[in-house]
């Protein structure tokens, strides 16, 4: 008897609700469904009726034509806790931008699928995001390691990218994985300075770093002038730029300077020796004052000027000229290192000089070591000082 009463109530109210839907009267439809719950609050039929009338979006995903569970969902730019397949209640009358993405899978990278959904009717809407994979393509210029490729695939991003600066000029970047390393130099390293206290640093976020020092051509395309002392080729590194000048360049391009920790981590590329080339270095491997030597190395060529970026072999992570050519500005103020392990160090909160790394064409090789640090006022310019840009993963 009770069951028959429930069915009758729900049927009658359901007819009223659906009639309201047909007239486009959302409020009346919802009110009718709520009345059914008021009569029989525990009735599954009444609850099912309300569910049918509630604006709802079901999001599914297919990857290479097959159902996929666990794809990331963004709604109006915000990452959702739920992953595919997922169900969301919508607010009537609102418009939602829904985006579905998956990480790299099986050596393939996937784009993003997006859909505009409008809660303009009661009940359930279903959207199945379809994503097709493409094999990772590694540009021939990248010269990256298998480690970088593997970690980029895990992160679901390209291992190398180009940033359009306008005017047909692009800047090349390679992927730098997250990781941990000993920053600074051991007490046994020849030529070490007192500000190189060795300590363990962990970088928790991967990033992209410029494959080369910023060139005069790149600077000219963004800033409209070339302040460099040494000229003659657009591929020469820009110099005579202050830290503040570099900030303006980065503001215009959406790039940034690397932190000092990011710079040394990328320079070392997994090594713990004085140079990424090993215990010593030669002028066949970098542009520095070849009249000077380091360790068991021999004298070489003293070029007395900058050379075009990429003139020497890159390190294991595809980065050219991390030793010599021009000093490279970092984001940090100069200061003492911490005595213990740190994560993602931003450097001191304040200071006077900013950090420079890598040495230059005018320096002896000991000054070009991976751990060596220099400093300079943020408004100062010098024909030994340039920079390399970084960019965060999007």
Image (cartoon, helix red, strand yellow):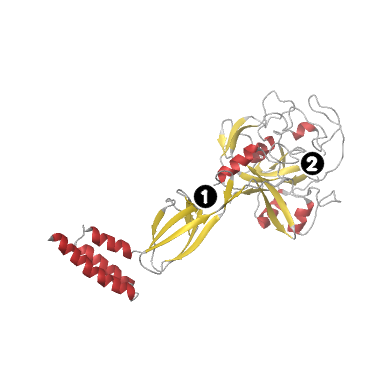
Q: Is 333 above or below relative to 255?
A: above
Residue nearest the observer in this picture, 319 or 346 = 319
Residue 374 place in picture, x, y as percent: 72, 38
Q: Is residue 289 left or right of residue 245?
A: right
Q: Quadrant of the N terminus?
A: bottom left
Where does label 2 land, which residue?
325
Question: Dot 1 corresponds to which residue?
Answer: 102
Please tell me which of labels 2 and 1 falls first in the chain: 1
41 to the left or right of 365: left
**Front in this rendered view, residue 293 or 124:** 124
The reply, left or right, for residue 334 in relation to residue 297 is left
* Residue 319: percent from left, percent from top: 71, 41
Element type at mark 2: loop
Give the residue drawn at x 73%, y 33%: 369
Q: How many marks?
A: 2
Question: Which residue is at 84% across, 30% downward?
Answer: 292
Q: Where 242 sits versus 179, above or below?
A: below
As displayed, is residue 148 above or below residue 295? Answer: below
| Residue lying at the far bottom of the rendered structure | 23
- How would you rate the neighbour count of disc 2 (Cα within 10 Å): few for under 14, some for 14-19, many for 20 or more? many
Q: Which mark is residue 112?
A: none
Q: Nearer the viewer, residue 335 or 160?
A: 160
Residue farthest along the front direction in this orientation: 65
Measured along the vertical axis of the image, is residue 31 above or below residue 190? Answer: below
Dividing the picture into quadrants, the one containing residue 349 is: top right
Looking at the image, which residue is at 73% across and 58% down?
222
Indicate the secondary structure of the residue bearing disc 1.
loop
């Amino acid at each position: 008897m009770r069951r028959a009463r429930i069915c009758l109530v729900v049927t009658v109210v359901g007819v009223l609700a659906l009639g309201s839907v047909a007239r486009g009267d959302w409020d009346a439809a919802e009110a009718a469904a709520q009345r059914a719950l008021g009569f029989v609050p525990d009735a599954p039929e009444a609850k099912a009726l309300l569910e049918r009338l509630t604006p709802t979006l079901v999001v599914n995903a297919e990857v290479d034509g097959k159902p996929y569970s666990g794809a990331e969902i963004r709604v109006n730019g915000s990452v959702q806790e739920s992953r595919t397949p997922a169900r969301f209640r919508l607010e009537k009358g609102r418009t939602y931008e829904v985006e579905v993405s998956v990480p790299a899978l099986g050596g393939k990278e996937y784009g993003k699928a997006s859909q505009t959904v409008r809660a303009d009717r009661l009940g359930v809407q279903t959207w199945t995001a379809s994503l097709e994979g493409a094999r990772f393509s590694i540009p021939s210029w990248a010269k990256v390691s298998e480690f970088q490729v593997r970690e980029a695939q895990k992160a679901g991003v390209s291992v190398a990218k180009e940033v359009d600066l306008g005017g047909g000029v692009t800047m090349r970047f390679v992927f730098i994985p997250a990781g941990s390393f000993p920053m600074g130099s051991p007490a046994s390293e020849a030529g070490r300075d007192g500000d190189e206290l060795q300590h363990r640093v962990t970088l928790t976020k991967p990033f992209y770093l410029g494959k080369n020092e910023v060139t005069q051509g790149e600077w000219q395309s963004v800033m409209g002038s070339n302040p460099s002392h040494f000229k003659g080729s657009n591929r020469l590194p820009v110099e005579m730029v202050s830290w503040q000048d570099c900030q303006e360049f980065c503001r215009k391009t959406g790039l940034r300077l690397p932190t000092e920790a990011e710079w040394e981590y990328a320079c070392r590329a997994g090594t713990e020796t004085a140079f990424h080339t090993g215990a010593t270095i030669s002028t066949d491997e970098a542009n520095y004052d070849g009249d000077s030597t380091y360790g068991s190395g021999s004298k070489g060529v003293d070029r007395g000027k900058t050379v075009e970026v990429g003139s020497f072999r890159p390190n294991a992570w595809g980065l050219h000229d991390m030793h010599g050519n021009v000093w490279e500005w970092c984001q940090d103020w100069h200061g003492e290192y911490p005595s213990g392990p740190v994560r993602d160090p931003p450097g001191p909160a304040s200071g006077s000089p900013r950090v420079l790394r890598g040495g230059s064409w005018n320096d002896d090789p000991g000054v070009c070591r991976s751990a060596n640090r220099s400093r300079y006022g943020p408004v100062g310019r010098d024909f030994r000082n340039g920079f390399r840009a970084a960019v965060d993963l999007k």
